[in-house]
């Protein structure tokens, strides 16, 4: 278990959300498609949304949005691929 996941479990304040079915989602180093890909999440993944920030506008299974979800230190995914149940922010703004 990473220190980050231990912290998340201890605080209980970060919710996990499913990535869109059938999608292997790119994890980027910043909130936009111009940032480097640092990981690819497998099919069926769920992600913690620590905070959210505006970035590159992306169209995905859950609409078009410029919201990016921070899922770890230097790890961001496009919110349009994460089923948060909202078109807006569901976590505090990053920064």
Image (spheres, rainbow, N blue to C red):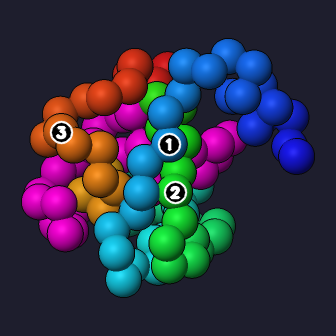
Q: Inspect this view and state whether residue 81 appears.
A: yes
Among the 4 quarters of the image, the one containing residue 8: top right
Q: Which element is circle 2 on?
A: strand
Among the 4 quarters of the image, the one containing residue 62: bottom left
Residue at numbered disc 1: 16
Measured in 3D between alpha carbons, the distance from the residue under mark 1 to the one under mark 2, in whole angstroms, is 6 Å
Compared to residue 91, the image places residue 66 above or below, namely below
- Mark 1 or mark 3, which has the lower sequence index? 1
| Residue at 72% over, 28% down | 9
Camera-side residue: 27 or 61? 61
Measured in 3D between alpha carbons, the distance from the residue under mark 2 to the one under mark 3, in whole angstroms, is 16 Å
Camera-side residue: 9 or 69? 9
| Residue at 63% over, 70% down | 39
| Image side of residue 30 versus residue 60, left or right | right
| Residue 46 among those drawn in magenta | no
| Residue at 19% over, 69% down | 61
| Image side of residue 83 versus residue 5, left or right | left
Q: Which element is circle 1 on?
A: strand
Give me the disc on residue 86. 3
Q: Give the range drawn in magenta.
A: 52-78
x, y (%) of residue 56? 27, 54
| Image side of residue 65 versus residue 46, left or right | left
Compared to residue 90, the image places residue 55 above or below, namely below
| Residue 66 among those drawn in magenta | yes
Residue at numbered disc 2: 46
């Amino acid at each position: 278990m990473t220190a980050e996941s231990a912290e998340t479990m201890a605080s209980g304040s970060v919710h996990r959300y499913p990535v869109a079915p059938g999608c292997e989602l790119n994890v980027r180093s910043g909130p936009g498609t111009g940032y480097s890909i640092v990981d690819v999440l497998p099919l069926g993944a769920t992600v913690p949304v620590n905070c959210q920030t505006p970035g590159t506008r992306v169209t995905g299974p859950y609409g078009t949005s410029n919201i990016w979800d921070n899922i770890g230190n230097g790890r961001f995914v496009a919110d349009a691929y994460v089923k948060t149940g909202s078109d807006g922010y569901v976590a505090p703004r990053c920064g």
